Image (cartoon, rainbow, N blue to C red):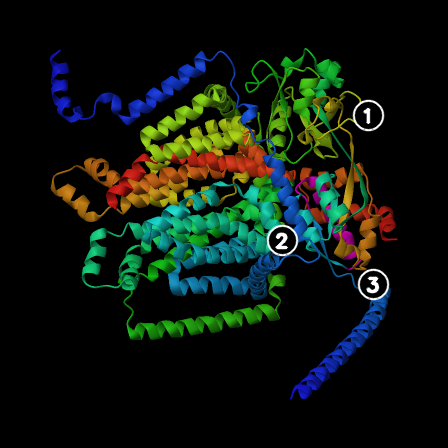
Amino acid sequence: MKERGTTTKEGRMSKRVGVRLGLLLSASLAAVVGLVSSGSALGEATQSCGTVALNEQAWAGSTANTYVAKYVLEKKLGCKVKITNITEIPVFQAMADGKVDVVLEDWQHVDQYKQFVSKQKSVLIVGSNGVIGHIGWYIPKYLLKQYPQFATWKGLKGKEDVFKSPESGSQGMFLGGDPSYVQKDKELIKLLGLNFKHITVGAEPAQVARFSQLIKQKKPVIFYWYTPQYLNVELGLTEVKLPARSKGCKDDASSGGNIKQYKCAYGITIINKLVSKKFATSGSPAVKFIRNWKWTNADQNFVATQIAGKKLNPEKAAEAWVKANSAKVNAWLK
Amino acid sequence: MTSVTAETVVRTPVVAHRPWWRGKLVQVAGIVAVMYFAYRARALEYPWPDRLTWNSLPFRLDDFQTWLLDQRNAANPSFVFAVFDGFATFVGNLVGWFNQFLLWLSWVGTIAIGSGIVLRFGGWRAATWVGAAFASFALMGVWEESMQTLALMLAAVGLSLLVGIPLGIVAGLSNRVQQAITPILDAMQIVPAFAYLMPVVILFSVGPGAAVVSTMIYAIPPAVRITALGIRRVPTNTVEAAESLGSTRAQLLSKVQLPLSRRMILLSVNQTILFALSMVVIAGLIGGGGLGDVVTSGLYSNPSLAILGGVAIVVMAMALDRSTEAIANRTDPSRRHLTDALRKRLRLATLVYAAGVGLAVGLAKIFDAPAIYPDTATAQERLLRRIQSVLDYVQDPAHFVFKFTEPIGNFILVHGVQPLQELLIGTPWFVTVAGLSAMALVVSGIRPAVTTLAMLTSIGVMGMWEPAMDTFSQVLVATVLAVLIGVALGVWAAESTTVSRALRPVNDVLQTLPQLVYIIPFIYLMPVSIVPGIVAGVLYASPVVVRLVERGVRDVAPTSVEAAGAFGATRRQVLTKVKIPLAGDAIMLGVNQGIIMVLAVVVIGGLVGSGGLGYLVAQGLVRGEFGLGVVASLAILALGIALDRVTQATHRERQEGIE
């Protein structure tokens, strides 16, 4: 009994080994076949692009580059494009999950880069999108004509009451930026000894409402703003020069530390293109296009003005730009 | 002299056992006076001391998020994540199938089937609503987006009711359950969605699944609360009568309590729909898609598109609301008197209609419906241009309207909100904590006072004292206004059907139109901080107060009203001496909900310049400062609980009186 038992057990064992071997064999065979077939798939990749999920961020510039990319992907590469509208931070997890493939305009989210790019490697930075971002203090041009000294921050000193409003009392009113943007204006005001009251006006559309209403009335106004932005031309905005950048100078006041390190102008932000690891390794011709993508502040502003300023349908605005800039587009496709 | 003595003679017997200085109102006024004196007399500023602040709390929370992210994205994540992921995938597929089905039917089939179902079960009036709503989506050129949102909302509302109504029934039957879940419901409604979007994304990823989950968090509480209130309001004598006739508990519930609370349960369905639809934009931020995206991207680059998306959301809310109500009314057991012959005819009609729809869909497929679909792209553009021209007109500062609105806004800010803000921020923290706790003690009793004390202290410990006091001043103004408007209109609507009918669409619009859609144009008219945020709070909160007050006054037992009438009470006496006191419970629920609703839009306020806690919560999400966002949200919650405890007095007393 016992013997038989062991033999059957052994028999079963050997059978199992056999099954395992068979599995291994077939798996390796499948792998070889897979490799060959994927190799051939790579060769044919120009035909099959699949679906690319582009994430559009909330601002007009992002709408501009997303729709231009969509047009090129659909019309030149035969891809299907899905546009998602996931907000800035959650989009990193979405890319890690493979639900979003591309973000064309990311304004340097350092903490997320640490988590998703360096640590998990589920998101890849594939270079700058060509646009150079810059944050600063802006005033309308008519004001500069009236007070030429406002070209630099020193000229603001002692003249803060020009910007006085019921809200700021005897001080000058400074309109702060959208909560999602990097800022250090409260610190700057304090460090530069300016008599401004920093007012948080909320999200960008609310901020636009505030300053454009003052600009339409040709009243004085100073506020946190940035470039590239289509409104800069439309409303005639100009930047106030802040103290030059020094070594070790920082921009994001929410990171804390010694307040002195914020006493300088905002730096230049290289705006990154991000892709998900899944997309990067998919072998789709769209990957190369996204890697090659590069345009300028002027390009982006042009398309954004068509969309947000002239209220043109984004698809049509993108089509018009692509048709007028075939040299640039062809370079992306090489 | 004589008149004074006459008055004392009249008043003495009434007041004898309660000296004047013990009146609650007087006591509260006294506390306020002492607080104000302390504010004026203070020699120094007393901000919340740093020694008593837990400064590392936000960083701890950030660490927690990083840990969770690491776990989630590890090579072999724990099975717990698989469960969440499975749920999200299931819900996502549900939404996806539904959406594909609606799109497959094409606009012809969807309109026909939608209005057909409502016609069969709800009646022609509601069916017209549904047909018109669908047609408007097509004409506005947002058909696909609307179908996406519809699919998402049907899943979210269905699941919310599936969870909410049974929970509400249990909470209605058991005081212990009610007490246990009330704080959880408060938290679900008050903690801003911005604070939990990131954890939801970590657990459920992005897409329709995550969007449904975040919508459910906000839409379940009204289903539970109103259902529970309905069960509780079933007259005790009816329940006792059924019990004495030997009903089992199951019979009692199914034959007495549920049928008698039908109207309140219907109200809960209706509110769940409206609450869910008010989340469309926020759900869009994490991949909900549909109309939410139209609104969000419109806000930044094309305001008229945002308005169009907002209008579509409102139209959908109203159509869903009207059709569910009509269907529910048809199921009223007292109205069901179909004869067999009639039933047969109805079945035949349904069959014929279904065949007709099938034919229509088939034809639409053959002739490619999207192709014969009116050219909506140009229709939409024309519509957008029209909206834009209206916006340009309204937002023009050279226009005469601005000459009124700007000074009014400045006046409210400079003479109303700013002094209050300075007062609350400037008052030494210990005076505020002691004063508010004392008020809670006087008004509500010892336990609420202890809770208030604990909540206010925790706000300070979390390092949120100053922004919380800033927000408190705004919430105070908004709540007072919302309750005043809500109670006045609610009572009026209960007395007059015309007013009720006129108010209903207004309420629906205010509750479901995404606030930013109307608040951003409003900023052009009143370009001052804080005021637009307060307006958003008042406009969002008052409809709920109106609804609950109206329902409460209307549902006062007719026998009591008749009895009062028999004693010769005038209409006004009936209203003030009978109806309003008897509806006290519902009115207090309205006040309570008013506070919660105002707090629920604090973040919207933060996005339009109110600063305070709302801005910090928004910053927490959009800058990836998770810890900061959570701490600020907890401060909003603590503030909400404290305010609730300070104001709950009569509510508690009444409840005890009933039980």
Image vertical order of residue B629 relative to residue A281, above or below: above
Range of the magenta residues?
A: A56-78
Any magenta on residue A68?
A: yes
- Can you identify the residue that label 3 sits on? A45
- Amino acid carrying label 1: it is Lys
Side of B399 where B254 appears, left or right = left
Q: Quadrant of the N terminus of chain A?
A: bottom right
Magenta part, dominant SS: helix
Residues tagged by mark 1 and mark 3 found on one chain of the structure: yes
Q: Number of labelled discs?
A: 3
Per the rendering, the mark at residue B205 is 2
Observer able to see residue B390: no
| Mark whose residue sits in front, 1 or 3 | 1
Asked if marks 2 and 1 touch (Cβ < 8 Å), the reply is: no
* Other residues around mark 1 within 10 Å, as few (<14) / some (14–19) / many (≥20): few
Residue name at image x 69 percent, y 31 percent: A255
Question: x, y (%) of residue A215?
Answer: 64, 24
Q: Earlier in the sequence, mark 1 or mark 3?
A: 3
Question: x, y (%) of residue B202?
Answer: 62, 50
Disc 1/disc 3 C-alpha distance (Å): 48 Å
Q: Secondary structure at mark 3?
A: loop
Disc 2/disc 1 C-alpha distance (Å): 40 Å
- Can you identify the residue that label 1 sits on? A247
Image vertical order of residue B403 relative to residue B573, above or below: above
Name the chain under label 1: A
- Amino acid carrying label 3: it is Ala
* Other residues around mark 3 within 10 Å, as few (<14) / some (14–19) / many (≥20): some
Side of B542 where B334 appears, left or right = left
Any magenta on residue B282?
A: no
Which one is in front, B415 or A124? Answer: A124
Which one is in front, A104 or A115? Answer: A115
Which one is in front, B462 or A161? Answer: B462
